[in-house]
Amino acid sequence: MQKEETDAINLTLRFGEGKYYWINTFGCQMNEHDSEVMAALIESLGFQPASTLEEANLVIINTCAVRKKPEDKVASMLGKLDALKKEKDELIIAVGGCMTQQEDLAVYIKKRFNQVDLVFGTHALPRLPELLDRARRQKEIILDIKEDYCEREGLPVNRATSYHAWLPIIYGCNNYCAYCVVPFVRGRERSREYDAIVVEASALVHQGYREITLLGQNVNSYGQDLPEKPGFASLLGKLDQIDGLSRIRFMTSHPKDLSLELIQTVARGEKICEHFHLPAQSGSNRILEKMNRRYSREQYLELVQAIKENIPEVSITSDIIVGFPGEREDDFAATLDLVKQARFDSAFAFIYSPRRGTKAEKLPDYTTYEEKEKRLQALNKIQQQISLEENEKLVNKTLEVLVEGTSKSNPELQTGRLRNNKLVHFAGSDRLTGKLIGVRITEARTWNLFGASEGEPY
Ligand code: 5AD
Ligand code: SF4
């Protein structure tokens, strides 16, 4: 019998029947969505979700490589699993995601964590069932980190909620920002077919989903690699016409590709939420150039102004890197100044983390880590004050909230999301989950808001 035939037979046996799986996800929304696909693929083999890690017969770690911190967390998780496997011999441990797409790291995992059964890169996702089938029968570790862009259309998805869906529209990234590992681990830009996205969005609405978030490392370059080059603004406009859909979100936007047409589409759109995640990374032209971001601080600030002028209720969030190699005091001061002028609703700030194979890895860096930490704290302090002030502007307004369920920090409260992506906590029943309601904002804090439910007018 041919090997393929035995594989097919084993897959139809549903070897996961009566067994449990656990997925641990690190990193961004694209990884969260990939984990939803992994879950569906595994369930097609008969596995069911485990309620604890210890109960699992199959553990998958979906890794992130964007900074060192998430990589360290993965290493510590793998150490813990090594111990677990010593007690439970039949446990299958699989490691996937961005870390594994780097050959040296995949080989390191293979050598250092000898209890791992399977290492599969981001491109191998559709092959997960066959790989697991081989892993359970083969004693030696399996490594599949080929860069062969396996077709992802039509894969099943096991979504985390029944009201919100992640919808990838473009995979990979072509920008090669000097600090970033993403183009190396996710490959070149590949846009999904326009019609496939529209059909999937309509099907989701049919199934009862009210909010869709379009995902891509840079959604603004959507369609540029397709024959008819449909733009992102055109796609958004088309999705806005789907009856029954309440909210459309998108992330992330690269400032160099954000057009006035897109801003106007968001302004006009009935369902398109008034939120831009627009990473600035730095406010210094000298550093932006070294980062290969291809915009200036002036252009960035003009964009922010254009967004705010066209969309009065908008919120803008950002990412900032502190301590990029060669960042001087005056460069950092320029970043602080940009943050003050842009008045972000919130911003994630990160200390620069050297990444293998990137251009910045080779740049000389004279600033100490302590100095970088000080800069991070100074930046966070200013941003937190601005976040609070921006949140205070919403007090006493009644706003549309999509309820996400009981609050993680207080079981007496429900948590929901405003169109501008801010979280609101309010007293109410958990039967409201997935519903659109009106909430009057009563209190503003730095990270979130508190309010009082005004029923279900939406
Ligand atoms: N070091 C620190 N931060 C980084 N980011 C990406 N690469 C690095 C790095 N090497 C940040 C950027 C990006 C966000 C997702 O992570 O700010 O927008
Ligand atoms: Fe990385 Fe730049 Fe691509 Fe974003 S746009 S994923 S920062 S290379």
Image: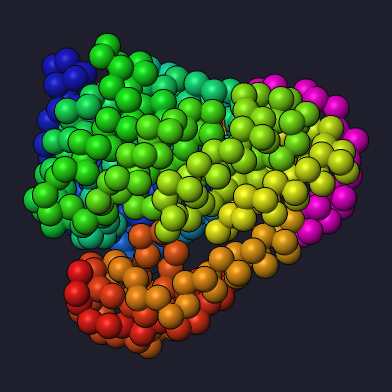
Q: In x, y percent, where is residue 77?
A: 55, 53
Q: Is residue 407 above or below residue 101?
A: below
Q: Nearer the viewer, residue 103 or 398?
A: 398
Q: In x, y percent, where is residue 122?
A: 42, 31
- What is the quadrant of the N terminus in the image? top left
Q: Looking at the image, how many numbered discs can be counted on the residues?
A: 0
Name the outermost residue toward the top: 227
Q: Nearer the viewer, residue 186 or 396?
A: 396
Q: Is residue 81 visible?
A: yes
Asked if the stretch drawn in magenta spans residue 20, the answer is no
Q: Is residue 69 left or right of residue 428?
A: right
Residue at 50 percent of width and 21 percent of height: 174
Residue at 48 percent of width and 48 percent of height: 309
> What are the residue bounds of the magenta stretch?
356-378
* Quadrant in the picture for residue 390: bottom right
Q: In x, y percent, where is residue 61?
A: 45, 47
Q: Is residue 56 above or below residue 137?
A: below
* Quadrant in the picture for residue 131: top left
Q: In x, y percent, where is residue 321?
A: 69, 43
Name the outermost residue toward the front: 309
Q: Is residue 335 left or right of residue 293?
A: right
Residue at 20 percent of width and 69 percent of height: 458
Residue at 64 percent of width and 63 percent of height: 386
Q: Nearer the viewer, residue 387 or 281?
A: 387
Q: Nearer the viewer, residue 98 or 110?
A: 98
Q: Quadrant of ligand 2?
A: top right
Q: Is residue 33 above or below residue 425?
A: above
Q: Is residue 292 left or right of residue 26?
A: right
